Image (spheres, rainbow, N blue to C red):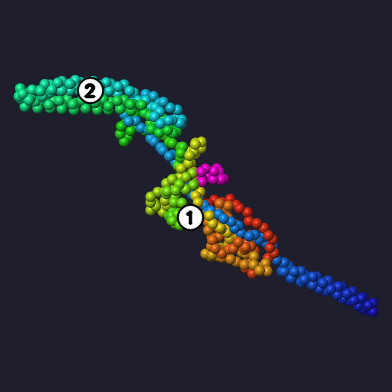
């Protein structure tokens, strides 16, 4: 019994020692954890800050449009007959006056010969009528010829003169019809394919005349695009204030790029603005003209036109990614005093050609814009700033107006 008590006391002593060691380790660990938590809470979130881009710019407006031929002609026959010959290759460049089609000339040559014969007869009748009149004219003064005979021969002379005029007109008409059997190119340009093959009967000389082919002139070539009513008003007011030339009278420069191009490589001139705003779409049509000497541009192609939308002025610009939205308000986070986050409301303009958003109001050139970790920060929060710069980007102004 005494041996059992001794062992029990020994076990209790060992247990107490182990408990004391455990409590000591727990207290030490808890103390270390309590020290780390405040340190973690005090660590500021790292962010990048940059000054907004501030420089002199000219704002550009972009519009999507389509190229059209400066001249387009539907070639139709002016006389009816059998198509005898096609004198061009499909798609070739033709010159004004070049013979494209030949219609069977034989019926028209016969008609011309007949008209010439009638003209000759009319001339002979005129000579006879003139001679007869001259005879009675000299006898009238002596009273050797009656008044009735004199008047009859005079009327015969007038009729003969009219007949000659009619015969001459018939000859000219026959000559013209014979000339029309050679269908010539009315303009220089690219010809389409022949719509009618040799040997077919074609109808001519009416509104429903047979369409033989088409010709388009592509040098120069036109580019048509439409702008909104608000854009039109903006341009008019700029012109009245002397900040930009008049779109209708001063041939403003236009830059155009194609669908496979990244830059505006083609120079054009604005030469037409329509005389009214379309009541259905609320837009107004404009036209630019390009020389297109290398014939790269074809009617029907799409492109984008860029035209100046302001005078040269100083502007502050930031990336779209740093702009936040609070209902109808737009804001950016700016680094304030003691590295605290500050929110500034801004009034925005359009995207510039460098891909940055123009800020009309709310920022100054010295404001340091916070450019990252925007979802993790808020006004009044202390951050750890690191300097960076804002780089230009590519922009699609036509979709970002």
Which of the numbered marks, if any, corresponds to residue 100?
none
Q: Nearer the viewer, mark 1 or mark 2?
A: 1
Label 1 neighbour load within 10 Å: few <14, some 14-19, many 20+: some
Q: Relative to 7, is 112 on the left or the right?
A: left
What is the magenta range? 255-267
Which of the numbered marks, if any, corresponds to residue 119?
2
Q: Residue at x 55, y 54 (%)?
A: 57
Estimate the x, y position of residue 364 in percent, counting from the top left.
Answer: 59, 63
Q: Nearer the viewer, residue 253 or 98?
A: 253
Is disc 1 placed on a helix, strand or loop?
loop
Residue 364 colored in magenta in the image:
no
Which of the numbered marks, if any, corresponds to residue 243?
1
Estimate the x, y position of residue 293 in percent, counting from the top left.
Answer: 49, 36
- Point out the residue furthest to the front here: 142
Q: Is residue 20 above or below residue 343?
A: below
User: Visible in this render: residue 218?
Assistant: yes
Q: What count of labels does the image hold?
A: 2
Q: Is residue 195 above or below residue 245?
A: above
Q: Residue at x 42, y 30 (%)?
A: 95
Is disc 2 placed on a helix, strand or loop?
helix
Q: Is residue 112 above or below residue 387?
A: above
In three-dimensional space, the C-alpha distance between marks 1 and 2, rounded to whole angstroms, equals 70 Å
Q: Nearer the viewer, residue 166 or 279?
A: 166
């Amino acid at each position: 019994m005494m041996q059992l008590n001794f062992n029990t006391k020994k076990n209790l002593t060992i247990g107490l020692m182990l408990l004391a060691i455990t409590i000591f380790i727990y207290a030490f660990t808890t103390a270390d954890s309590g020290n780390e938590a405040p340190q973690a809470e005090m660590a500021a979130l790292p962010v990048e800050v940059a000054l907004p881009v501030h420089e002199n710019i000219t704002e550009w407006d972009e519009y999507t449009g389509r190229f059209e031929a400066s001249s387009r002609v539907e070639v139709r026959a002016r006389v009816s007959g059998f198509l005898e010959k096609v004198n061009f290759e499909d798609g070739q460049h033709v010159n004004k006056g070049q013979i494209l089609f030949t219609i069977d000339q034989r019926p028209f040559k016969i008609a011309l010969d007949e008209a010439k014969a009638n003209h000759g007869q009319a001339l002979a009748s005129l000579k006879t009528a003139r001679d007869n009149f001259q005879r009675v004219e000299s006898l009238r003064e002596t009273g050797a010829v009656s008044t009735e005979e004199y008047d009859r021969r005079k009327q015969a002379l007038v009729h003969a003169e009219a007949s000659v005029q009619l015969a001459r007109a018939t000859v000219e008409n026959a000559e013209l019809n014979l000339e029309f059997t050679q269908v010539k190119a009315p303009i220089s340009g690219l010809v389409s394919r022949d719509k009618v093959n040799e040997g077919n009967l074609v109808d001519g000389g009416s509104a429903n005349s047979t369409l033989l082919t088409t010709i388009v002139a592509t040098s120069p070539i036109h580019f048509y695009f439409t702008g909104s009513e608000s854009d039109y008003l903006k341009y008019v007011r700029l012109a009245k204030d002397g900040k930009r030339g008049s779109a209708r009278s001063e041939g403003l420069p236009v830059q155009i790029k194609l669908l496979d191009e990244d830059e505006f490589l083609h120079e054009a001139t604005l030469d037409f603005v329509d005389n009214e705003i379309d009541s259905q779409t609320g837009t107004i049509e404009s036209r630019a003209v390009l020389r297109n000497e290398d014939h790269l541009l074809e009617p029907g192609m799409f492109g984008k036109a860029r035209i100046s939308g302001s005078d040269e002025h100083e502007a502050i610009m930031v990336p779209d990614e740093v702009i936040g939205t609070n209902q109808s308000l737009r804001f950016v986070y700016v680094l304030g005093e003691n590295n605290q986050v500050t929110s500034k409301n801004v009034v925005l303009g359009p995207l510039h050609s460098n891909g940055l958003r123009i800020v009309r109001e709310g920022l100054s050139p010295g404001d340091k814009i916070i450019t990252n970790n925007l979802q993790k920060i808020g006004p009044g929060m202390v951050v750890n700033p690191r300097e960076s710069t804002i780089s230009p980007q590519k922009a699609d102004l036509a979709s970002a107006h």
